[in-house]
Image: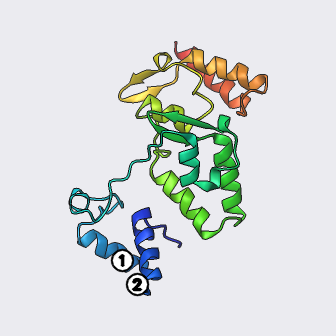
Amino acid sequence: MNIIYPPLVQQMHEMLKKQGIDKPIDQLYKEMVSLDMITQTGEPTNLSIEEGLVKNYQQKHNRLIDFKKEYPIFMSYPKEEFTQQVGVWYVSQKILGDVAVKMDNGQFEYDEIQQVSVYMSYRNYDNPHNSIAETKGCYHPWYTKYDDSEFQLLNGKVAIPLSVIKDMLYRAEIGELDLDVEKLEQMAKSMEETE
């Protein structure tokens, strides 16, 4: 089993290797947690930020070019494949698909894998329905054209209204969106039945 360690652990491991210290990454992770530098999930602790051991790093970039400089793996994609939501840049579903294929085919170098890992670790792709900005960012370009007021929050989760689903279906049918039309039709039909 190939364990992927949090970005802060991987960065520390690389830094130590450059200094000639070859410590096993699993041991380094345990030490960083025991020294209260990071949490078990790899986030910096308040203590490590206050002591200056770890910088509280936010994934906010004012300009797309700044984002691309930090993630050169995305440099070749055109600007319409990106969206900025509440100061955070997100890549499109098309880019995510390209990245997944390249990962599966082993086409990435170590530094490119690190870029993808860091990018994903600062975005909530596992559960992007906690805020409208996250939902719109993670599913770009599906929902980004719609005004935030068109979405609803139900039980703390973003609900996509039927009107948006129907418009997305139309956009998919005319080739504006690359989506599974059949799946969207089923979703719209089930939503109509519950109204």
Q: Residues within 10 Å of mark 1 (few under 14, many from 20)?
A: some
Name above or below for residue 45 compared with residue 81: below
Q: CA distance from mark 2 to mark 1?
A: 7 Å
Task: Please state which amino acid type lies under the numbered disc 1.
Answer: Leu
Name above or below for residue 86 compared with residue 51: above
Q: Residue at x 68, y 31 (%)?
A: 183
Q: Secondary structure at mark 1?
A: helix
Task: Please state which amino acid type lies under the numbered disc 2.
Answer: Lys
Q: Secondary structure at mark 2?
A: loop
Would you identify the image quadrant in which residue 46 lies? Answer: bottom left
List x then y, in percent, for residue 109.
65, 68
Would you identify the image quadrant in which residue 179 lies? Answer: top right
Furthest toward the right, the residue is 174
List x then y, in percent, for residue 20.
44, 87
**Which one is in front, 91 or 192?**
91
Furthest toward the top, the residue is 195
Q: Residue at x 21, y 63 (%)?
A: 51
Question: Does 42 sit left or right of 83 as displayed?
Answer: left
List x then y, in percent, for residue 132.
45, 29
Tell me the residue that label 2 is attached to. 23
Tell me the residue that label 1 is attached to. 28
So how many labels did they put on this image?
Answer: 2
Whether label 2 touches label 1, CB < 8 Å:
yes
Question: Does 179 sit left or right of 163 as displayed?
Answer: right
Name above or below for residue 167 compared with residue 60: above
Q: Residue at x 57, y 35 (%)?
A: 83
